[in-house]
Image (spheres, rainbow, N blue to C red):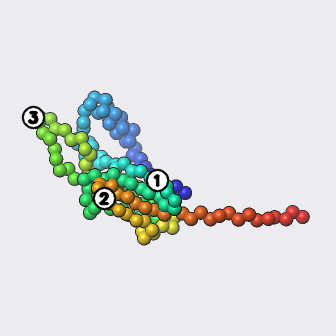
Amino acid sequence: MTLTVVRRRSPFEGLTNWFDDMDAWCDYNSSSRSIEKGWLPPIDIAEEEGTYLVKADLPGLKKEDIHVELHGRYLTLRGERKSEHEEKRGHYRRVERKYGTFERRLSVPEGLTEKDIKAHYRDGVLELTIPTPKVEKHKAIDVKIE
């Protein structure tokens, strides 16, 4: 089994994506909608010998702002980046970095406990080390045909 990212679907996702595309096309930044919607930190998943290595970019967050939870077969990364700066000129306001809450959910192998998962956070990057499931070797059975 490999690790997979679980995507949440919204009935309005297509419409939201259309608005985002229109904003980009018109070079218009709808900051208020970005803040309401939150953000998704980019993640990398690599399989190394005996482990999965998950890296999530979480710049500007403190260790206390990040929560990692294991519920059954799902590992959830959750947190919040609070707005700290905004640039104002006349009636215009521009905020390009995303703020608000985030949540990423990964499907992990069965049978893991929180003790199996190692987390390390440094320089804005969260690293999770998750053991790969032990693959049982198949045994051949000789069947005698009479």
Between the residue at mark 3 and the residue at mark 1, the CA separation in whole angstroms equals 47 Å
Location of mark 3 (residue): 90
**Cβ atoms at labels 3 and 1 below 8 Å apart:** no
Picture coordinates of residue 37 (x, y %)?
A: 30, 46
| Quarter assignment of residue 97 | top left
Location of mark 2 (residue): 122
Q: Earlier in the sequence, mark 3 or mark 2?
A: 3
Viewer-proximal residue, 135 or 49? 49
Res 38 label: none
Q: Earlier in the sequence, mark 3 or mark 1?
A: 1
Q: Quadrant of the N terminus?
A: bottom right
> Helix, strand, or loop for circle 3?
loop
Q: Quadrant of the C terminus?
A: bottom right
Picture coordinates of residue 130 (x, y %)?
A: 45, 62
* CA neighbours of label 1 inside 10 A, class few (<14), some (14 to 19), many (20+): few
Tell me what residue is drawn at x 16 percent, y 47 percent.
85
* CA neighbours of label 2 inside 10 A, class few (<14), some (14 to 19), many (20+): few
| Quarter assignment of residue 62 | bottom left
Between the residue at mark 3 and the residue at mark 2, the CA separation in whole angstroms equals 38 Å
| Quarter assignment of residue 92 | top left
As drawn, 129 above or below 5: below
Location of mark 1 (residue): 46
Observer-side mark, 3 or 2, equals: 2
